[in-house]
Image (cartoon, helix red, strand yellow):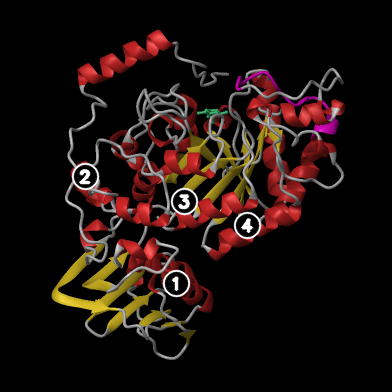
Amino acid sequence: MAHALRPRRLTAALAAVTATVLLTLGATAPTATTSTAAKPATAVASFADIVPAPVSAVPATGVSYALPSSASVSSDVAAVGGYLAAILRKSTGYAVPVSTAPGTIQLLLSGAPAAVGAQGYQLDVTASGVTVRAQAAAGLFAGVQTLLEILPPGVESSTVQPGPWTLPGGRVVDYPRYAYRGAMLDVARHFFTVAQVERYIDQIARYKIDYLHLHLSDDQGWRIAINGWPQLTAHGGSTEVGGGPGGYYTQADYAAITAYAQQHYITVVPEIDMPGHSNAAQSSYAQLNCDGVAPPLYTGTDVGFSSFCVGSPTTYTFLDDVIGQLAALTPGPYLHIGGDEAQSTSAADYATFVNKVQAITAAHGKTAIGWHDIANATLLPSTIAQFWDTSTSNKALTAAAKKGTKIIMSPANHAYLDMKYTSSTPLGQDWAGLTDVKKAYDWDPGAYLSGVPASAVVGVEAPLWTETIVTSADIEYMAFPRLAALAELGWSPESTHTWTAFRTRLAAQGPRWKAAGITYYHSTQIAWPTGS
Ligand code: NGO
């Protein structure tokens, strides 16, 4: 079987040569920029600055609307009204009551054009108020994100800021290009608490991300409690990369995360990586190893050395428990079965294993997603492959796509949020190259893989692997601004895609992140407003 083998480390010398070549070619050479003049914090935002770019945004010249101190929200979906009001209360200091009586901001499940579908919306700002119309709650929630983006940046602050809170007049009609717009967080290499995951959910929801993929197990840690297999968390969850204390989610913790995600119209996709990347489980239970010997816990960053025992019935008794419990706990339709870098599993065993695990997943009522390596096995028609290589062609995946397999696009050299921005980025890795903002943004998910039709692509995901990522500040530094680039690739029509327009839109996010307390990477490719 052809595995995508990734070089483990570029030597310093090779990295230096690579950087020089790239600079000579101008491929990732930063565009020289100077900061743009700072707008006052209360300046009226522009429809041109919305990220992800909407399908259509038509300003009404000379029209604007300032929230009065008596501003109120009326909403056909109480939870969405409550979400908006809570954000407005913090920064405006206004009372912002929520009711079904007509308010200054109306969120309505009526009157939206048919074209917006289940996730889109129409937003109108007139001289007398603000109205978001959608066909479903998810659309209202997306419209609320845009509404927040056309308020002054101070709206992102958690403390009361001076007004006025003026919105530009006009109409936005908007809906997504792809149904799947994901972010992945690896909670296995380093563990992140429920509160840290919720903080990331808050942030990704603002960019209309609708799936959160949680990488719950790997060689270094098992992070979800499974009844009947207590050592998985007691032992397998007890450390992480670098030897820290690790951690794990109880089933109640996991339910809290999925519920919080649902409140943000985000579906959690849990991943148990297998048959490789399985050392933490194998270290917890000797019977999961072909030789019956439990290996020690592992806190390094090498890959490819572990494999569940494919020929043993115990492996499938175990996986049926894991997948069954996770399926019962997970509201969404997908379970991610990993499948990457199974270098210690023979090709024949790999195919057998992927078949069995797809069947177990289906028996528990879920659709399997796997890293694209699974295209080397025979896939069920419903199974989705997640592309993560650095190449633009993959024979097995192209063949699967021709038979109907759908694909999520996460090319490591564009979409991986753990790649360094430049050679001097203190965090991250560089095995897939350096990924500054332009590289993250400037590719087309629908036309990227040769021989794969645009119709096979169901979406885009930005994975954040955490070998070097320890704190929420680390997460935010690597995710922002690139997450916004990936979110735009997932949401915005291909026709809006130009780097020059995007870099201007993105610059306007700087003051918003600053107000939100997000320490983002100040890429030199972007002319961030002074002081942001
Ligand atoms: C690879 C590998 C992961 C690493 C990541 C680091 C996939 C799918 N498997 O991506 O185990 O953490 O690179 O960038």
Q: Which residue is mark 1?
A: 84
Mark sitting on residue 351: none
Q: Residue at x 77, y 39 (%)?
A: 319
Q: Which residue is mark 2?
A: 498
Locate residue 232: give its quadrant.
top right
Measured Cα–Cα span from mark 3 to mark 2? 22 Å
Locate residue 71: give its quadrant.
bottom left
Residue 246 rendering spot, x and y as whole percentages: 69, 36
**Which numbered disc, 1 or 4, marks the residue closer to the eye?**
1
Q: Which residue is mark 4?
A: 258
Q: Nearer the viewer, residue 287 or 500?
A: 500
Q: Residue 386: in sight, yes or no?
A: yes
Tag 4 and tag 3, C-beta contact below 8 Å: no
Mark sitting on residue 180: 3
Kind of residue indicated by mark 2: Thr
Kind of residue indicated by mark 3: Tyr
